[in-house]
Amino acid sequence: MPPQSPLERAIHLEIQWPPRRPTFLPLRPHRHGLNSRSCEVWNGSSEVSLRGCSCLEVGPLCRPHDRPARTESAVLSSSKIVLLDGPSCSGKSGARSALMGLYPELVFCHRVTTRPRREAESDADYRFITAEEFQRLEKSNGLAAWRHFEFGMSYGLPRESVEAALQKNCSVLCLIDLGTIEEAKSCWPQAIGVLLYAPLEQLERRLKARHSHSQAQIRERLENAERVWEKRHLYDHVILNRDGQWEQTLQALTQALKLA
């Protein structure tokens, strides 16, 4: 069956050229890892699909089946801002945990949200606030970027926490919300925008596995995912996080930080 969605059509492309900027993730098939599967990693508007590769070398020395060495943290410069975006269940929380483990010098700036806390959910990714508190932050220009979703949920990135970290010459990792990359970039033009994505059928399966969303909520999230894919050119790096390929994803993320 031919691909139906924009993402499904896009991942069948071999190469779209020229790239938006000359620096892109250097990828090549590992000589011992060929089979019938394909892996895709994108940077900006340069979309590369290497067919027949079960392993990719991301950079000249790093292979996805090797865990990144802790010594890679030395490449992070000070006052770097990483804006990590992606649809629901794309792997943002896992990426945050992995990057914070690899780079302890990164400061993670929590988002605020009005959505209910899920069962057994910690404050690792969000600071949970009331709708009134969110409205006060919004009106006082306390949010660098924010979005109101259907079903009464709002998310935003507080400006103050990011600025405080930058004043200390720290590098900052922020998880942002779909549709807010332009607002966040207008505040910090030097920021590195990374979009983490996954095929729609895999996103849908992950959403259903949470057992916390109605069919209408799942449909809304998948529609949001398709919309953000149409704006992938706004990001510096676009990385596909397929099921079972977390090591490749993590290697691409660390390579993106090194190239910035």
Image (tube, helix red, strand yellow):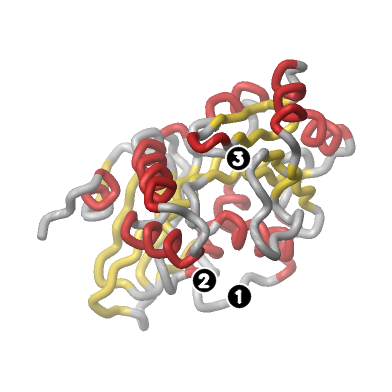
The amino acid type, in three-letter code, at marker 2 is Glu
**Residue placed farthest to the left in the image?**
1
Kindly indicate the quadrant of the structure image that contains residue 102. bottom right
Q: Is residue 182 depicted above or below 219 in this figure? A: above
- Provide residue 214's location: percent of width, then percent of height: 43, 53
Please report contact status of discs 1 and 2: CB closer than 8 Å, yes or no. yes
Q: To which residue does mark 1 refer?
A: 67
Instruction: State the SS at label 1.
Output: loop
Q: Is residue 56 left or right of residue 67?
A: left
Q: Is residue 113 depicted above or below 58 in this figure? A: above
Gap between marks 1 and 3 measured at Cα: 26 Å
Gap between marks 3 and 2 measured at Cα: 23 Å
Instruction: State the SS at label 2.
Output: helix
Please tell me which residue is depicted at 57% across the width and 54% down the height of the picture.
92
Q: To which residue does mark 2 refer?
A: 247
Q: Nearer the viewer, residue 136 or 145?
A: 136
Number of other residues with Cα within 10 Å of mark 3, as a class: few under 14, some 14 to 19, many 20 or more: many
Q: Is residue 172 depicted above or below 35 in this figure? A: above
Instruction: Pick whichever of labels 3 and 2 is earlier in the sequence.
Output: 3
The amino acid type, in three-letter code, at marker 3 is Ile
Q: To which residue does mark 3 refer?
A: 176
Number of other residues with Cα within 10 Å of mark 1, as a class: few under 14, some 14 to 19, many 20 or more: few
Instruction: Pick whichever of labels 1 and 3 is earlier in the sequence.
Output: 1
**Residue placed farthest to the bottom in the image?**
32
The amino acid type, in three-letter code, at marker 1 is Arg
**Residue placed farthest to the right in the image?**
168
- Provide residue 75's location: percent of width, then percent of height: 71, 54
Q: Nearer the viewer, residue 164 or 40?
A: 164
